[in-house]
Amino acid sequence: MSSHSSAEWGLILASARGLMRMAGVASLATLECGTGAPYASLITAATETDGSPIMLISKLAWHTRNLEADDRASILFSAQAGGDDPLNLGRVSLMGRAERTSEPRARARFLARHPSAALYADFADFSFWRLKVERAHYVGGFGRITTLEGGDVLLGPAAARAWDADVDSAIEAVNSAHAELVARLAPAGASAQPHPWRVAACDPDGCEIAAGDYSHRLAFPAPISAPAELSAALFELFRRAA
């Protein structure tokens, strides 16, 4: 925890994981096959329940060939730039080793974040990969820098397993009982979709709502401890928006 108080440390962890959850696009750094030179590329990304980044990449891409030769990688997530100096915005770099994954949960969470990727997710040259996070470098703004271990920035394995055991039924219940509420939480200008809005995925930090090929991430005001709290968190989001 270094020199940070418990409250400061909790805020740093929540902010770092929030950046990872919200950013659907990230920069991937790999080591070029054959030369070992650094190579940076753009990817679409999502996160597993514990926060581990997931990507869907083609074996035709340079970064995939690089990972097949050397699995060391880094992914940079950053806050969306507005009128502020981009260097004053939060960002987090994750370092670790990448591995292919065929777990249905990883696939479902990625496609909940990027519904249009379902068009090519099953192509023979595409596969899902996760980054096994070993360290993280968090910058909360100018001069606010913290190094985190992978076990700090991610949820614990037991907590993630317990969450995954109950989350599907909680999502089904919310979509059945509170469809109108979910539609009202859609972003301005995107509410009139030909498909009904629904909760597509959920983790302790927030959820994805989707309508057809459109997806939107909602961050909870505070992390929730169990999927049973999903409906209450959505009502709180609506109350604050109203």
Image: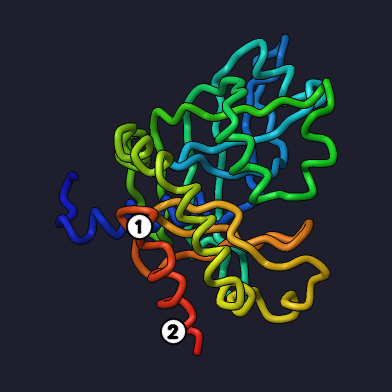
Depth order, front residue of 25/92: 25
Q: Is residue 145 above or below residue 132?
A: below
Dot 1 surroundings within 10 Å: few (below 14), some, or many (20 or more)? few
Q: At 33% from the left edge and 51% from the top edge, which residue is drawn?
A: 13
The image quarter in which residue 236 lies: bottom left
Write down the residue under mark 2.
240
- Please tell me which of labels 2 and 1 falls first in the chain: 1
Which dot marks residue 144?
1
Q: Secondary structure at mark 2?
A: helix
Q: Amino acid at mark 2?
A: Arg
Depth order, front residue of 32/111: 111
47 on left or right of 37: left
Q: Position of residue 128 (x, y in %)?
A: 66, 28
The image quarter in which residue 187 lies: bottom right
* Quadrant showing the N terminus: top left
Q: At 79% from the left edge and 49% from the top edge, which residue is drawn?
A: 116
Q: Position of residue 2 (x, y in %)?
A: 18, 45
